[in-house]
Image: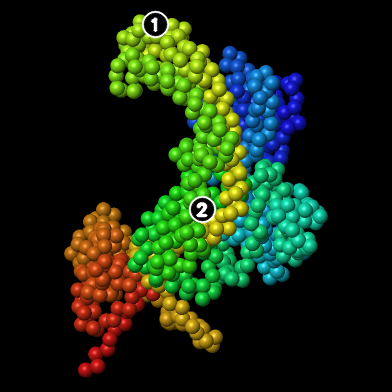
Amino acid sequence: NEILENKGELLTVTYFKLQRYFEKKYGKNSVVLMEIGTFFEVYEVNNDEEQIGKAKEIAELLNIQLTRKNKSILENSKENPIMAGVPAISLEKHLARIIGEQKYTIALIRQKGLPPKVTRYLDTVVSPGTNFDFVLDQDENNITSLTIDNNKGIYSIGYSAIDVTTGKCYYNEVHGTSEDKSYALDEAFNYMNMHKTSEVVISFADKNIHQKEVIEYLELSHKTFHISTFRPKIVYQNELFKNVFNIQSLLTSIEHLDMERVPLATEALAILIDFVISHDAKIIQKLSHPIKLDVSKYIYLGNNALEQLNIIDTPHNPSLIRLLNNTSTAMGKRLLKERLTHPIKDAKELLRRYSLSKELYDYHAPIENELSNIYDIERLTRRIKLSRLHPFELNYLYDSLLSIKEVVTFMENYKFFESPCSSNDLQIFIDSIDSTFDLSISGKYMLKDVEDNMISSGINTKIDELNAQNQELLEKLESIRTHILSFLKSSDGNFVTINRLDKEGFFIGLTKNRYNLIKKELEQAHLVVDNQLLLFKDFKVRIQTNSVKITCSLTEEISDKYVHNLRKIIELNKLVFKEKLIEFENKFSKLLEDLVTFIAEIDVTVSNIKTAKKYNFVCPQIVKTKDEEDKLIFDRKLKHGSGSSMYGLEYAKSLHMDKEFLRIANDIRKKITDDYEPIERISQQKRSNYNKNMIISTCTICAKPVDDVHHIKEQARANKEGFIGHMNVNHKYNLIPLCKEHHKMVHEGKININGFVATSKGLELHYTYVEDKR
């Protein structure tokens, strides 16, 4: 703001000072968007002496025209920079597009006042991890802080993460060992995969750490990251946590949060909170208390298992999450990902989840429809707590509560889930919204754009009085309208209308032809409104191409009073709206938080059921074993020699004859003897009638030409959907190509086909010959 206070320099020069300041503070991908008139503009200088700004980059991203400040001057300089701009009215749309790149930190400079007394100020700084208003993805959006120390080559890491859109906060502290010095780095990498991270603040407690090596190890170059040199003192940490987490205790804030034994984690959390405050202090308020990532509850996932097993999305491979995700709500999607990336070891909890799926298996259809109508109430709750909810989002909450009520009623009747509240409790919340707001009006507006009264009668006496005054003003206009309409002798009231334009105020409108019909009669008429005599000959008549606008001193007076009242009404609407958000938070925030957990659990359960039906999955069985019996037996046997020589190509001997003759002779020999190499048979692309994706070439047992395709598990065992267990009867691993001889032996019981087994060379068919005991 100090830079903006210099009134004596050109705005473009001030702009580039700001650009340099934010690049130094947040990195080279910083962008300043400055409000100038009715546009937000971005500038760039790109000449032989200097290169600064992102106008070209942003113009290409938003597909908008790039130009110069003064098009008549070819020179590109700070006084005449390259520029691009977007209308202020559509800023949110374009800002969401820029933020969606997960790359830029945007400093938003707004203006206030009227020319010539216009001042500009820093409104907010938005980065990938501090993005509160423009999140398009249903997934988590964490900003993460890592404080890294090193002692004799062994790494220790303090980890913390905050999702500002939900208020969730996580932390942990990890230490390497002499056997695995980089264990802490591996764990930090896993945490960032488990909790989707869009921005990282990294600080080094030891100045001797090879920073570039750590950054490469953690693959931070793929994310937006910042290196921080800030080392907050314990006194500052305690004060910061006290305010952010609203701690009122005789203990210190760190002790109250049970974090006194993880100093690196508390430092990481303090650095992170301080970093978010520098962007937007409002979004860091009312966070949930930090949750420690208790890895002892979960199966250990080492060696980047989440990516190795394709659990999470990667740029090149589809993920297990995408395959199994049939959730309907954002909360359910986030919970499903959490469960897949945090596989639990608690058998009781697993059995509880399986039991829910079994109980709901045949009854989920009615609630599935309701789930699809529920918005992201977790993020809406967070917006209520911070008084950042928009009126149109209140409609989302209202619609969601109606659907949640149906789900709760369903559970009350069938007892599948224990609801956190009764349907009557929800009805109280629904009625509170319905009786306070006109949802047909609130659904149209963001808070800053409200142009009409959305507060119901009886909520605020000042608004009611102003509305009553405006209604009286409209009745006066109506008396003028009906008087003019009487001259047309028509029962159609639409022939004469009351209209209002922002610049012109109220006027009476009718078509030019109808006005000409009553013009003479109207000029001789008069009307008394509120003891005031109005002569129509004194009215102002503006004749346009097809219509006529009629005004008078009374309509102008009404316009001024109406607009004055309306402005007060809108101001009071915004005030009452925020007051009601505080009231809703105090009364219903705990209920909403419980409903988030409730709906997410149901949604994941329904998703599991849909997935099970889609792929014919069955419920796993948890088998209890004794420790001495808890072992895995492999059905592999060691054999002498190098194994079968069936694989590979047989090379022809050199005959030192004409090559073309040899080729023709070889082709003839193959056709007569049907002696093709396996690879040649594959190239013929003969496909199975049961599965078009299966190319059949040779008998799996003897490598002779294939004659038939055999089902390992008989077709007669398949259910009506064509499944045997979880496998389709015509899946390629239930089919084996055989020659006539071996197919006959299988059906005669001379060969037992056991199926495919995994070997170091891939899947191989396991079969045995049956001795004839006769």
Residue 524 has which mark? 1
Q: Is residue 749 above or below residue 534?
A: below
SS label for mark 1: loop
**Residue 558: x %, y % from top left:** 52, 20
**Residue 480: x %, y % from top left:** 42, 18
Spatial CA span between label 2 and label 1: 59 Å
Q: Is residue 9 above or below residue 276?
A: above
**Given the image, on which type of amino acid does mark 2 rest?**
Phe
**Given the image, on which type of amino acid does mark 1 rest?**
Gln
Q: Quadrant of the C terminus?
A: bottom left
**Residue 24: x %, y % from top left:** 71, 38
Q: Is residue 62 visible?
A: no
* Residue positioned most to the bottom: 774
Check disc 2 and report the residue beneath it.
429
Residue 516 has which mark? none
Q: Is residue 382 above or below residue 179?
A: above
